[in-house]
């Protein structure tokens, strides 16, 4: 694991399916392509979202960061994969956690999108980065910043209540 958990080491990153299957990035992208190939007449949404959860145990702090990749066959189901990274040490402040989550999603998108485009026509799907911020909670003042970070890198950003990839799927595994 690299010192900055928001970086993606494409050769060593492992994702897990809900059934427990462990896949490298290339195999995960292959599973996504296979899912799309099963119903080529459908349209898809590819979602990347991250969430985190801090825990304290006997004075030590641990933060679980989870990034989920969801391929949603609009109106007909979905498949997802997730990656969990633990950071031990001081629990980051909320702003740092949100930026780390956003950067984890953004960096993953930058790594896998070229491979996905080789296997799936961009006309078959929309790509969204789901950010775990919303206009009603303590993260409301960060929305413009993190949405700008994502859109400035050429991706579509979704926030609560539309950021289910982060706030539901990734959250399930934190």
Image: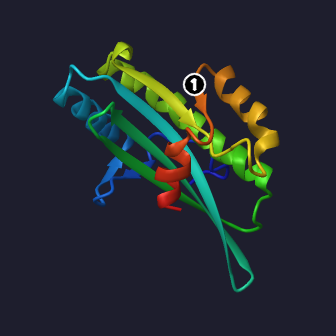
Left or right side of 137 for 85:
left
Residue nearer the viewer, 126 or 54: 126
Q: Residue at x 45, y 31 (%)?
A: 112
Which residue appears at 22% of the width and 33% of the height? 34
Q: Position of residue 5 (x, y in %)?
A: 62, 50
Look at the picture and state if 95 lies above or below 117: below
Residue 125 percent coordinates (x, y): 38, 22
Callout 1: 10 Å neighbours few (<14), some, many (20+)? some
Quarter of the figure that contains the N terminus: bottom right
Residue depicted at x 49% and y 44%: 165
**Figure colour scheme:** rainbow
Q: How many marks?
A: 1
Judged from this view, the residue extending furthest toward the front is 136
Residue situated furthest top in the rendering: 123
Which residue is found at the position 21% from the left and 19% from the top?
Answer: 41
Image check: 82 left or right of 140?
left
Q: Position of residue 99 (x, y in %)?
A: 72, 44
x and y, in percent, of residue 102 in the image: 65, 41
Q: Picture quarter containing residue 110?
A: top right
Residue nearer the viewer, 157 or 5: 157
Q: Residue furthest left?
A: 38
Q: Which residue is mark 1?
A: 156
SS of the residue at dot 1? strand
């Amino acid at each position: 694991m690299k010192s900055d958990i928001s970086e993606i080491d494409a050769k060593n990153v492992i994702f897990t399916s809900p059934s427990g299957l462990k896949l490298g990035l290339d195999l995960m992208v292959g599973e996504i392509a296979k899912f799309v190939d099963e119903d080529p007449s459908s349209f898809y949404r590819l979602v990347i979202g991250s969430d985190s959860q801090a825990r304290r145990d006997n004075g030590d702090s641990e933060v679980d960061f989870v990034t989920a990749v969801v391929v949603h066959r609009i109106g007909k189901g979905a498949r997802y994969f997730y990656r969990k990274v633990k950071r031990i040490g001081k629990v980051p402040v909320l702003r740092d956690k949100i930026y780390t989550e956003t950067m984890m999603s953004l960096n993953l998108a930058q790594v896998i999108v070229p491979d996905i485009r080789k296997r799936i026509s961009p006309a078959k799907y929309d790509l969204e980065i789901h950010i775990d911020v919303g206009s009603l909670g303590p993260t409301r003042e960060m929305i413009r910043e993190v949405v700008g970070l994502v859109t400035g890198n050429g991706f579509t950003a979704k926030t609560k209540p539309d950021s289910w990839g982060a706030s539901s799927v990734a959250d399930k595994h934190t």
